[in-house]
Every structure is written in structure tokens, then in C-alpha cells.
Image: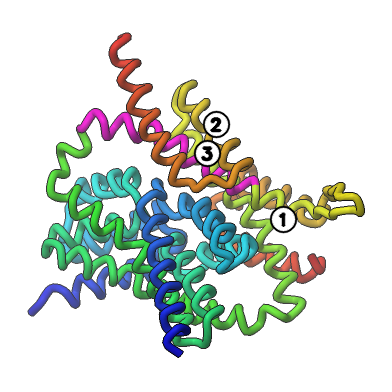
Amino acid sequence: MMSVLSVRVMLFLRLFFEFFKTGLFAVGGGMATIPFLYNMADSTGWFTRMDVDNMIAVGESTPGPIGVNMATYVGYITGSGEGGLPLAILGAVVATLGLITPSIIVILIIASFLKSFRDNRYVESAFYGLRPASTGLIAAAGLSVIVANLFFTETLAGGFSLAFFNWKGIVLAAVLWVLTNKVKQTKKLHPIIFIGASAVVGIVLGM
Amino acid sequence: MSIYPDLFATFAKVGVMTFGGGYAMLPILQREVVDNKGWATEEELVDYFAIGQCTPGIIAVNTATFIGQKQRGVLGGIVSTLGLVFPSLVIISLLAGVITTFSHLAWVNHAFAGIRVCVCILILNAVIKLLKKSVIDVPAGILFAAVALCAYFTSLSPVWFVLLAAVAGIILKNLGGKKA
């Protein structure tokens, strides 16, 4: 009994730590947490990369900052893997607190010397490097999402793997890209509308 | 009367009314925090946003901490931030429970397969938007490409890329400064 308890305490401590790390190193807002979530999926096995993809959609279509929503969702899934509803909710709370703790600490420190922080030459030059790197990390995550969802891979006998196009997915992606970038009437619409429409298309086409 | 419940409630309201985060929150903060409460001026809000964007963490969280700190110091910052994330905790916990319960149904899986295709495009659009702001010259472009490729083909923690990029930024900018 004691060992179950201590294993659980360790799990929640690690959950807090993993999200603390995410909150400390994800620069540039919600989307910047995605690469950290993938890394967490691979290194902890608490949830899958597909869970991350789903939670991006859930995070975008529910009230609240997307980064916070994703942390809450991951924490919930991780906690529910351990037991019932109380542990799921505990997981959600622990992950969210882990994510926001570094922000609170960093901002409280910066708030005390606000002006000199913004004008500091080294801070400014560090961010010159950080911004493209953060974008690069999100791009790599985006590429993983695309490969995972627009292609089917099959491993044949002998270890060869073959990639097949997920035609339904590619056509839907192309239509969505045009609607969100090229069509004046639709490109300003809220993402939740495209997410909802994609869910309907997924059901109708049996994707 | 204590201001803490007001800070918590106001930021909870901002949390409920924000979809997606980041810039989506700016007009709501303008109405609630600047116009209704007078806790910050328009200029301060823009400053907080700019700093929130280039400091670690979620922009919305950083901004809430700033405004709360300005009102009531450390505790004010903490209370405001907890207020902001409170609705997310409630809504997502309810929703995650529902999704987990119904995830074995075929049509739910079909719906999520469609949704994930949409997520591909949402991330692609976000990257294109960020590229325009972050890749402002050739060295920044090289840094972007190098990080994107290394992150895709290795399983290194993103932490290393962030640390190395900050160092690279300092070196590149200060070398450029000496030449000019």
C-alpha cells in the first residue's frame, strides 16, 4: 500500500517537473509547448503523440489559453491512467500548476526591473536567436503531425516500410489550407469552425 | 474590501472569454482590465504583451501575472494567474472525461481523425505567421532551418535547442555589432 502511494507521489512530482520544464523553456506562447509535449510523450509514455494531436484541437476549441488547456488535458489523461476521477483531476491541477509556476517566478522578477529588461542588449540579442529556434521547434512538431496524419505507414516483411498517402486527409488538408489562407470570406473565421467542420467530414468520410 | 476576489474573478472571466490564447486575448483584456477596472493603461498592456511574448511560458499567463503584480505585488500576481487558469481546469477536466468515456466509439475516432487533419493546417498556418516575425535575416533563417531539421530527426529535448539558440543569438548579434 505504501509503495503504491509513493509511486503515485513520484509520478505527480515528475508530472509537475515535466510541466515546469515546459513552462520554463517554451518561449512564444501556447504553440511553443507542442514540441515539449511530443518529447514528453516519447520519454514518459504517459500519453501518445496522437493524444497530443487531439489535445491541440481540444485546446483550440475550448475557452482558455491553448497552452493551459493542453497542459490540463495531458495532466488529466496521465492522472486517469493511474486511477479514477480524483487522480485525473489531481493530474490536471498538478500539470497546470507546473506549467504556470516558472512564468509566475520569471515575470515577478522581471516586473521589478521592467525597463532595464526590455532595453538590455544581451536579452535582446538572445531573443534574436530564440525566436527563429522556437519557430523551428514548432515547425518540426508540425511536420510530425503531418506525417502521422496524412500518411499511413506499413512495415512489410523484411523490415521495409512503405508510406501510403491518406488521400481523404490530404484532400481535406488542401481544402482547409485554401479556406484559411486564400478565401477572403473564410480566412478570418475562428479555428473552432474549421475544427468542427473537419470532425463532420471525418465522420461522413469514415476517416 | 479585499481586491483579491476581484482579481481572481476578473481573470477567470478573461480566461472564459479567450479562445486560443495569445493575441485573441488582447481585446478582452483591453475591455476588462483597461476600460472596466482601470488596472493598467493601454500602453502598459502592450508592454506586458510584448514582454510576455519573449519570456518563457504562456503569453496569457505572463500578462495576468504582470497586471496582478502591479495591483497587489507577489500575491496579486499569483491570484490573478490562478484566476486565469481556473476555467480551463474546470472545462477541460469535464471535457477530457467525456472524451475518454466515448473514445471507443467508431464515429468519435472518425471525428478526431478529421480534426487532426485540421490541426496539421492550424500548426502550418501558425508556423508561417511566426516565420514572418522571427526569420528577419539570413542567419535567423539558417538557425530556423537547423533547429527544425535537428528537432525533427533527433529526439533531443527541445530545452537544448532553446539554450543553444539564446547563446547563438548573443554571439551573432554582438559580432555583427562590432563589424558595423
- Per the model, the C-alpha gap separating discs 3 and 1 is 20 Å
Between label 3 and label 2, give the one nearer the viewer.
Answer: 2
Q: Residue at x 24, y 57 (%)?
A: A105
- Lateral position of residue B174 relative to residue A50, left or right: left
Q: How dense is the environment of label 3, judged by Cα within 10 Å: few (below 14), some, or many (20 and up)?
A: many
Say which residue label 1 marks: A149
State yes or no: residue A162 in magenta. no
Q: Are marks 1 and 2 in contact (CB under 8 Å)?
A: no
- Residue at the farthest bottom position: A1
User: Measuring 60% from the left and 36% from the top, which residue is drawn there?
Assistant: B149
Q: Position of residue A10 (x, y in %)?
A: 42, 73
Task: Say which residue appears at 52% left-offset and 43% top-offset.
Answer: A137
The magenta region covers: A120-143
Q: Which mark is residue B146?
A: 2
Circle 3/circle 2 CB separation < 8 Å: yes
Front residue (pair A8, B86): A8
| Residue A197, horizontal then vertical, whole percent | 67, 64
